[in-house]
């Protein structure tokens, strides 16, 4: 569905833990037992029940995703996905990052999630070049939105203004 894509993709600057959406996506590590960055913020916002729940998920391979309740967060669900660590670009990093968006969105569709927010996965501690990561995020999300109407809105939450500017520049080329 080509029409209306611009209304179904939003780019904002902010703290993803504050968003009252059906699901927020966590840039987790493969243990799913918390960490720093957005992972730490989400666990702080959700409270200790999230860690207890995630212990039973038995981790998550890079590029895949698992869902949990949001507990004390305003969001109903957290979709935990594990981005690739950037190792120079010859270790299938781009495909693995694309899989994070694809698998998170597939879980969203399966769980009848209609509004979902993503951080800039892998662009922090994991060192993935921001422009390339943002292009992958926008391109893969557009493909899923084109293919089905199950998701009403995807919000890309940029924590800093530099990230915001990159997403805003790239969306002009991804969504003509
Ligand atoms: N809301 C939105 N975005 C945030 C927030 C927040 N509250 N906090 C951080 N970010 C942004 C960062 O600024 C960056 O743009 O999320 C993006 C991803 O950065 P990281 O959180 O460092 O995630 P990532 O690069 O995928 O590294 C994952 O870091 O925290 C650990 O346990 C995590 O081992 C895993 C690794």
Image (tube, grey):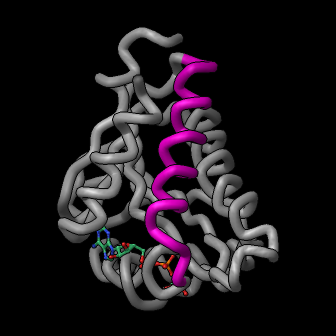
Nearest to the observer: residue 135 or residue 84: 135
Q: Classify the position of the C terminus by image quarter.
A: top left
Up/down of 10 relative to 23, above or below: above
- Residue 109 coordinates in the image, percent (x, y): 59, 33
Q: What stretch is highlighted in magenta?
A: 127-148
> How many circles with numbers are drawn on the protein?
0
Q: Quadrant of residue 105?
A: top right
Nearest to the observer: residue 71 or residue 109: 109
Up/down of 107 relative to 25, above or below: above
Nearest to the observer: residue 13 or residue 105: 13
State the residue at coordinates (52%, 83%): 127
Residue 121 visible? The answer is yes
- Residue 124 coordinates in the image, percent (x, y): 43, 81
State the residue at coordinates (53%, 26%): 145
Ligand 1 shows up in the quarter that is bottom left
Residue 137 included in the magenta stretch of the image: yes
State the residue at coordinates (75%, 58%): 95
């Amino acid at each position: 569905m080509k029409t209306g894509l611009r209304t179904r993709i939003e780019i904002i600057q902010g703290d993803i833990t504050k968003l009252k959406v059906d699901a927020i996506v966590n840039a987790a590590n493969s243990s799913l037992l918390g960490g720093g960055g957005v992972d730490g913020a989400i666990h702080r916002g959700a409270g200790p029940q999230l860690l207890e729940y995630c212990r039973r998920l038995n981790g998550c391979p890079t590029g895949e995703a698992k869902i949990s309740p949001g507990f004390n967060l305003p969001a109903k669900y957290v979709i935990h996905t594990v981005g690739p660590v950037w190792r120079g670009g010859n270790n299938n990093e781009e495909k693995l990052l694309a899989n994070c968006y694809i698998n998170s969105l597939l879980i969203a569709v399966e769980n009848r999630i209609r509004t979902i927010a993503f951080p800039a996965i892998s662009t922090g501690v994991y060192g993935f070049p921001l422009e390339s990561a943002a292009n992958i995020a926008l391109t893969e999300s557009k493909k899923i939105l084109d293919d089905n109407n199950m998701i009403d809105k995807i919000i890309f939450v940029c924590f800093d203004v530099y990230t915001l500017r990159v997403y805003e520049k790239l969306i002009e080329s991804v969504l003509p």
